[in-house]
Amino acid sequence: MELLIAKKKDKDIWDKAVLKSERGTIFHTWDWLEILEESSGLRLYYLLLFDGDELFGIFPIFEGKKYFLKYGYSPPPGFEMTYLGPLFIRYMNLKQNKKEEKILKATREFDSFFFSEQKYNYVDFGTVPGFEEIKPILWRGYKARPKFTYNLSLDKSLDKLWCGLSRSAKKEIKKAKKNGIKMRTGDWKELKFIQKRRIERSREIGRSVPKLKDYFKKLFDCFFPEKLKIFVAEDDCGKLISGSIILIFKDKGYGWVGLHKGNDTYTNTFLLWEVICWSKRKGLSSFEIMDAGNALRTCRFKSKFNPQTYTWFNISKYLSNRSKLVRNILKY
């Protein structure tokens, strides 16, 4: 296998690979990654992996430095992304031994770039949901922690989707309607409301404030309204109560940012249900209620909609035990 670094002229090759990959997401598209690079201030390498003449995989990796440590992230922290990592193309129909063989070879090439060429002290990435062929990655010395997100198939009728809701979800939706809560779409004004709520929530719980202002504006200008939708819930006086940013890629919807704690639970339940109904009416095949990990509160909320659990993995590797020790000391 041969590893190459894609340039701007290779944008079409990259985006076609994202579309061909069974696990390709909007986060892997060139436009999204370019905005993420600009907003993060990190250097981005678009890695192309060829098996002979055929493109087998891609891997966007962000390079940064802190003190004397050099690291690679995919995605970088602080930008409302849970997973990114490598994509492999047309590998799912391979026999198991071929899958493992090819992904092991691919991991060797990526490994060589990370630790031999770029001299990273640390690499951290999140795999896309549903990618389970991580054994070859573990064989190369990486550590993996399972994480979970939720995916709701929309192949059922709305009536059956409603029947699948928990009893508490149905009560909350009915309560919201009784109280005059309504859902509508929005644009930049409503996105700024969601952005403000997100920043306020980070301050409330003592977390670092995400770098959202320019980032969200660039994403909005690039993807709205075809691939980025804004949905808000408002009361009968027109006051905004809650909001959610929805992404659309291929035939799938993604519940990305919003539904922040602090709203009445029934408002968030109502809004998410209305977004699911909208997705069904638009002919989407599934809707991912995105989740970053294993938090009990968010899992209880999202599981009320009767989705399937999808596993993704947080994968990391240190150049040496010394690198691990220094990173832990710096809490980096």
Image: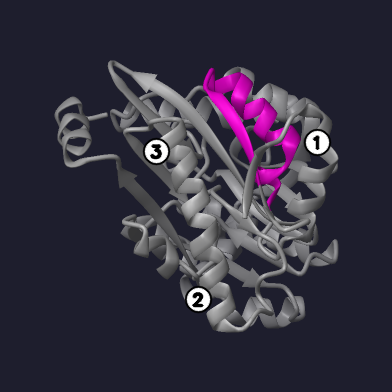
Quick check: is 189 in the magenta stretch? Answer: no
Q: Position of residue 209 (x, y in %)?
A: 41, 23
Q: Of discs 3 and 1, which sits in the foreground? A: 3
Q: Dot 1 corresponds to which residue?
A: 10
- Residue 130 located left or right of residue 118: right
Q: What label sits on residue 53 in the rendered view?
A: none
Quarter-of-image position of residue 160: bottom right
The answer to whether residue 262 shows anywhere in this view is yes
Magenta highlight range = 25-48
Q: Are marks 3 and 1 in contact (CB under 8 Å)?
A: no
* Amino acid identity at mark 2: Ser
* Amino acid identity at mark 3: Phe
Q: Determine the residue positioned at 17% across, 41% down.
A: 321
**Considering only order in the chain, which callout, 1 or 3, is on the residue closer to the N terminus?**
1
Q: Secondary structure at mark 1?
A: helix
Quick check: is 39 in the magenta stretch? Answer: yes
Q: Determine the residue positioned at 66% across, 40% down.
A: 4
Q: Characterize the local packing of mark 3: few (<14), some (14-19) or many (20 or more) Cα atoms within 10 angstroms.
A: some
Number of marks in the rendered image = 3
**Considering only order in the chain, which callout, 2 or 1, is on the residue closer to the N terminus?**
1
Q: Dot 2 corresponds to which residue?
A: 166
Q: Dot 3 corresponds to which residue?
A: 115
